[in-house]
Amino acid sequence: FQRRRRQSDATMTASASSSSSSDAVLPGYQVQLSDSGVGHSVAKLDKCATSLRSFLCSTDTSTAKRYSPQQHDWPVHTSPCLREEDTLSYRCRCTFQLICTADVNKLEYAMRVKCKPVSINATSFPIATQRIQVAMASFLELINRQAESSILLASRPASISFDSSWDGQDCTATVNYTDPLPDKEAWLVEADKLRRTCRLTCFTGRSKKRKLISSDGDAEIETYIHDTITICTSVHDGSIISVDVGGSVPTQTADISHCSISYL
């Protein structure tokens, strides 16, 4: 699968700082870091399975004659997470509002809950990929250190989105600005420095009717993120034996991919 972005030679730091996310909050999420992600996965899928059984029973009379929602042999397969670590470091795309703390005048990440921004209380997001977590922490540290003079802050950044590939080779960031972007050359000088420090494949600034791109390639074209999917099939009947996404995907994600492709 190819998502809009291109591969970079940037390498991923082995792991993100655990201290920066130990007190993190997941605004809008039903489960917080102190709760069991596995337990939530099991409960949520069981609820969906029950709902699906009821739906099939009410709409398919031929099926309803053979099964009832209460029967355990109803043909609905669920594949919940089996390990707590599988419920972390999985999101390849995250978007945050950038808010300024009144007391220290520093930017921090937030997510909207009922139309109000709620700080995640950390410099990285524990359920994002490790690649994104590292980029988040580096971006915030660098931008806050240069807060007084940075042209990257002149147009009032409102939000930021991070994207990464599964294998961690690619990571991009896009900042959406409230005011029009400033002089192109001046912005690109600082954007290039930030991109290299954060080891981003591409760093993009967007404002109304304008977009500036910092990358090692064509400065007018946004780069691409590539995710490699390897499908091993049987030489006898062509059936799928295994599915590997990017080489470093949590087991549950690979299992889901396997089931989906097998179904297709």
Image: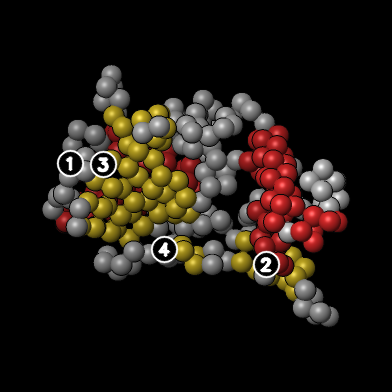
Q: Which mark is residue 261?
A: 2
Spatial separation of the CA atoms under disc 4 and disc 3: 22 Å
Look at label 3 and name its amino acid.
Answer: Pro
Vertical order, 196 against 238 (above or below): above
On the image, the x and y values in percent for residue 51 come to: 69, 45
Spatial separation of the CA atoms under disc 1 and disc 2: 47 Å
Spatial separation of the CA atoms under disc 4 and disc 1: 26 Å
Look at label 1 and name its amino acid.
Answer: Ala
Name the colouring of the figure.
secondary structure
Vertical order, 236 against 151 (above or below): below
Q: Residue at x 38, y 48 (%)?
A: 161
Q: Which residue carries the number 4 mark?
A: 5
Q: Residue at x 39, y 35 (%)?
A: 112
Residue farthest toward the bottom in the current orientation of the protein: 236
Spatial separation of the CA atoms under disc 3 and disc 2: 40 Å
Residue contact at pointers 4 and 1, CB within 8 angstroms: no
In front: label 3 or label 2 = 2
Residue farthest toward the left in the current orientation of the protein: 183
Nearest to N terminus: mark 3 or mark 2: 3
Q: Secondary structure at mark 3?
A: strand
Q: Is residue 73 left or right of residue 256?
A: right
On the image, the x and y values in percent for residue 234 come to: 79, 75
Residue contact at pointers 3 and 2, CB within 8 angstroms: no
Q: Which mark is residue 264?
A: none
Vertical order, 139 against 181 (above or below): above
Nearest to N terminus: mark 4 or mark 1: 4
Rendering quarter of residue 255: bottom right
Q: Secondary structure at mark 4?
A: loop
Q: Which residue carries the number 1 mark?
A: 154
Residue farthest toward the top in the current orientation of the protein: 103
Residue contact at pointers 4 and 3, CB within 8 angstroms: no
Q: Which residue carries the number 3 mark?
A: 157
